[in-house]
Image (cartoon, rainbow, N blue to C red):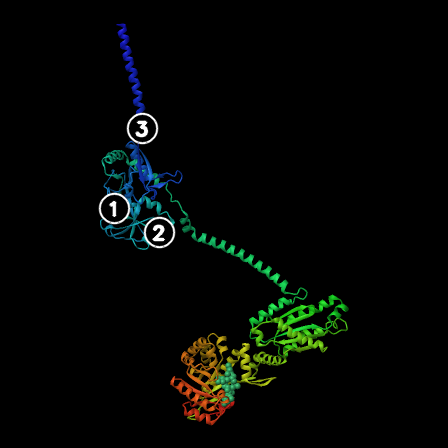
């Protein structure tokens, strides 16, 4: 019995131990079952903060959607793992088996491959809101053009189901969709309200307007392909969703909305602080530019210093031989119309001066020479020390007054340099002068010019003379006369030396005076009468003709006004030089202002432009002619037939009258042939529909001949010579 009892106890104990052994095992399994829940891969987007986004610190995807799903999954015994979908949109992600489920969906839709899907119950009712630019009213949803993000294509399908009339355009990203809204391609953008509450904090979007009235809600579900396994999965998830309390839902939403401040990216900073950043950048660029400029100026200054050292004589400050040559070349190129001379100057017995009074005294003399010369030289002139006491000077051709000034300011004080300092010695200077010829400007050879000046200086040395010797005296006389004419013009215009004379023009048929040409006459105070044939070309060359012509035009207009006031209407032709057109860019306007100033009519002025000018500068002359004619002035082509004739030009430039020049025709060739030519030219001009006047008519025979061939307007010594205004006024 005892043994039986013991056995029984043994059996009972064994069972107890067995049961005890079993009990903890159940517990352990239960615990470990809780820890190792079934895992669930959830594919989610990450582009819609605060619903789905990547946490900056942890780098994990999070958001309202994630937390809701995590809670629901936990309730259903899953451990949810969220991964960001790689596909363009949720529809495509549905076909990827990597994910167990995808979210969020408003309703079940077809996958991208056209497969049916199923969705869970609603996790939360999400509000969707319309946003517009600044519209207060928008059409009803069924007539609306709406923009949505491509990644919301599932949502777009749900919207389409709810509002079949809506026209949805999908955009790659938010900035594209906002661009479409702003450019009017869509009326409004539709998105999750939570996302808007985050995005509208972005400075660039701050002016967008939320339409609360257009708010509606959409379900927020989890979906997957429709098959048996997935139906079980969805059912299980639904059980989890069912156990999700509203308090929990609100806590999650609050958690992600209240603490989710919009994070500025670079574009936001640029938008917000763009002006300041731009100004800052500009400032930096300006400073950099300043630094570069400063460095450049310093370099240029240093280069200039070096250049000065090479090109200048250190003792006197004059140019060195090298510097002088360079400067002369520069000046001749810059002023090809200025008449220049080059002088080669040498102090007689300089060696003796050095030996007697010491080197310093010699140096002082040289410095004195250069300083005195520089006082008189303009920027267009130059002085160089070629060696020891030999100086070269490039000078604008001097008139007599200039030579006097040179003597007074440089040569006389030089002569007396030592006498003034109590020593009984006169300084003598020998100067060889070369007058530049037109060829010197074409082919600039400074060495050759200096050689010529040196030869003239040598002549003085050989003859034991001091003073000047001119290498090319004819050129010198010519140059001096031109210099006297040109330099004197400003004085002459004011002093009455220059007068306007008139040469009447007649109609040979009626014998009446029909007009006159204004020609200027100059009685130079020193040179006496100078012919326009001499001073007009000289002034043209020196660039002073415009001053003279302005004077002539003003005088003519003043005379016409006086005659008008006296009841005599006259018509005067004035000469317009090619240089005038170059000097005044709008000479036509100038004439128009002039007749307004004197209250005379445009048809009282004829403008003569010489034929050669038309040949040389066709376009410019044609343009000026057109403008003058548009203002009502008659334009005449002067000197026609005087040698430049290009008959072709007649069809290219429209003028009112051709002025036939007979002066040149008479002297040369066969007169019979000449007459045939004139006859046909007159006929041709007539046929071209232009008027014709002949000038230089010296004989009655010529006048009758011209009349016979249809040219009745004439000017020439046969009728009248040019005469002073007072005489012209007396003519009827
Ligand atoms: P031009 O414009 O061809 O002027 C006509 C020239 O022929 C004048 O010479 C006039 O005196 C001269 N002449 C008139 N009738 C006869 C004649 O029957 N036989 C001969 N052999 N000659 C006659 P002038 O006054 O010496 O003028 C010479 C040139 O100087 C003018 O030729 C004109 O080109 C220019 N000129 C004169 N005054 C002015 C002016 O105020 N401004 C401009 N730019 N040029 C002027
Ligand atoms: Ca003329
Ligand atoms: Ca003429």
The residue at which mark 3 appears reads as 34
Secondary structure at badge 3 equals helix
Local crowd size for mark 1, using a 10 Å CA cut-off: few (<14), some (14–19), many (≥20): some
Q: Is residue 323 left or right of residue 186?
A: right
Residue depth check, mark 3 versus mark 2: number of the one nearer the observer: 3
Picture coordinates of residue 408, whole percent (x, y): 68, 76
Give the labeled residue for mark 1: 157
**Drawn side of residue 388 relative to residue 675, left or right:** right
Assign a secondary structure to mark 2: loop
Callouts 1 and 2 close, C-beta under 8 Å: no
Relative image position of residue 589 (x, y in whole percent): 45, 76
Q: CA distance from mark 3 to mark 2?
A: 51 Å
The mark nearer the N terminus, 3 or 2, is 3
Name the residue at the top extreme.
1
Look at the image and say whether residue 156 sits in the magenta stretch: yes
Tag 1's secondary structure?
A: helix
Q: Which residue is mark 2?
A: 207
Q: Is residue 716 visible?
A: yes
The first of marks 1 and 2 along the sequence is 1
CA–CA distance between discs 1 and 2? Answer: 29 Å
Q: In the image, residue 434 lies at what x, y percent?
A: 63, 76
* Quarter of the figure with the N terminus: top left
First to last magenta residue range: 154-161
Q: CA distance from mark 1 to mark 3?
A: 39 Å
**Residue at the spot 32% in from the left edge and 55% down from the top edge:** 183
Cβ at disc 3 under 8 Å from ligand 1 = no
Mark 2, other Cα within 10 Å: few <14 / some 14–19 / many ≥20: few
In this picture, residue 58 sits left or right of residue 723: left
Residue 579 x, y percent position in the rendering = 50, 77
């Amino acid at each position: 019995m005892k043994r039986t009892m013991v056995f029984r106890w043994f059996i009972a104990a064994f069972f107890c131990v067995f049961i005890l052994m079993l009990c903890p095992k159940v517990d352990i399994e239960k615990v470990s079952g809780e820890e190792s829940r079934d895992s669930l891969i959830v594919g989610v987007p990450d582009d819609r903060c605060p619903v789905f986004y990547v946490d900056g610190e942890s780098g994990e995807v999070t958001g309202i959607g994630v937390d809701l799903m995590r809670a629901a999954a936990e309730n259903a015994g899953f451990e949810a793992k969220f991964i960001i979908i790689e596909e363009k949109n949720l529809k495509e992600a549905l076909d990827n088996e990597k994910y167990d489920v995808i979210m969020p969906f408003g309703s079940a839709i077809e996958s991208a491959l056209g497969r049916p899907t199923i969705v869970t119950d609603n996790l939360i009712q999400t509000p969707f809101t319309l946003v517009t630019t600044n519209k207060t009213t928008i059409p009803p949803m069924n007539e609306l053009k709406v923009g949505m993000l491509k990644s919301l294509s599932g949502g777009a399908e749900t919207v389409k189901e709810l509002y079949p009339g809506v026209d949805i355009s999908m955009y790659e990203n938010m900035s594209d969709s906002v661009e479409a809204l702003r450019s009017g391609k869509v009326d409004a953008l539709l998105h999750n309200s939570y996302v808007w509450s985050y995005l509208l904090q972005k400075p660039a979007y701050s002016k967008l307007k939320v339409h609360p009235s257009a708010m509606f809600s959409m379900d927020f579900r989890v979906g997957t392909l429709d098959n048996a396994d997935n139906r079980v999965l969805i059912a299980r998830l639904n059980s989890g969703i069912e156990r999700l309390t509203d308090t929990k839902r609100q806590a999650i939403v609050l958690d992600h909305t209240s603490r989710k401040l919009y994070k500025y990216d670079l574009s936001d900073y640029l938008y917000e602080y763009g002006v300041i950043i731009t100004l800052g950048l500009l400032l930096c660029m300006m400073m950099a530019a300043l630094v570069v400029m400063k460095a450049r100026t310093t370099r240029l200054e240093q280069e200039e210093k070096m250049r000065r050292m090479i090109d200048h004589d250190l003792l006197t400050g004059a140019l060195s031989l090298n510097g002088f040559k360079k400067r002369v070349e520069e000046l001749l190129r810059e002023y090809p119309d200025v008449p220049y001379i080059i002088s080669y100057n040498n102090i007689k017995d300089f060696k003796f001066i050095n030996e007697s009074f010491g080197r310093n005294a010699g140096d002082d003399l040289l410095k004195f020479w250069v300083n005195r010369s520089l006082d008189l030289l303009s920027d267009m002139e130059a002085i160089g020390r070629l060696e020891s006491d030999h100086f070269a000077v490039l000078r604008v051709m001097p008139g007599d007054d200039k030579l006097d000034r040179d003597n007074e300011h440089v040569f006389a004080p030089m002569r007396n340099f030592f006498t003034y300092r109590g020593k009984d010695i006169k300084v003598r200077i020998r100067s060889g002068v070369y007058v530049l010829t037109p060829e010197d400007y074409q082919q600039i050879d400074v060495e050759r010019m200096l050689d010529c000046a040196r030869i003239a200086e040598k002549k003085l040395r050989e003859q034991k003379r001091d003073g000047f010797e001119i290498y090319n005296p004819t050129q010198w006389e010519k140059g001096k006369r031109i210099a006297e004419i040109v330099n004197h013009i400003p004085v002459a215009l004011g002093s009455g030396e220059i007068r306007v004379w008139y040469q009447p023009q007649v109609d040979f048929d009626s014998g009446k005076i029909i007009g006159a040409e204004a020609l200027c006459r100059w009685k130079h105070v020193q040179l006496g009468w100078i012919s326009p044939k001499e001073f007009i070309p000289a002034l043209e060359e020196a660039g002073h003709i415009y001053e003279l012509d302005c004077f002539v035009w003003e005088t003519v207009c003043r005379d016409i006004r006086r005659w008008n006031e006296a009841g005599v209407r006259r018509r005067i032709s004035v000469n317009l030089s090619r240089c005038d057109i170059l000097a005044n860019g709008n000479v036509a306007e100038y004439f128009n202002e002039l007749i307004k100033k004197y209250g005379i009519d445009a048809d009282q002025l004829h403008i003569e432009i010489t034929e050669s000018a038309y040949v040389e500068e066709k376009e410019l002359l044609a343009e000026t002619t057109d403008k003058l004619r548009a203002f009502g002035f008659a334009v005449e082509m002067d000197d026609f037939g005087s040698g430049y004739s290009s008959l072709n030009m007649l069809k290219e430039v429209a003028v009112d009258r051709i002025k036939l020049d007979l002066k040149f025709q008479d002297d040369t060739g066969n007169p019979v042939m000449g007459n045939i030519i004139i006859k046909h030219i007159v006929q041709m001009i007539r046929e071209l529909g232009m008027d014709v006047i002949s000038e230089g008519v010296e004989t009655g025979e010529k006048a009758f001949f011209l009349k016979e061939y249809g040219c009745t307007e004439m000017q020439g010594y046969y009728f009248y010579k040019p005469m002073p205004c007072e005489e012209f006024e007396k003519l009827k």
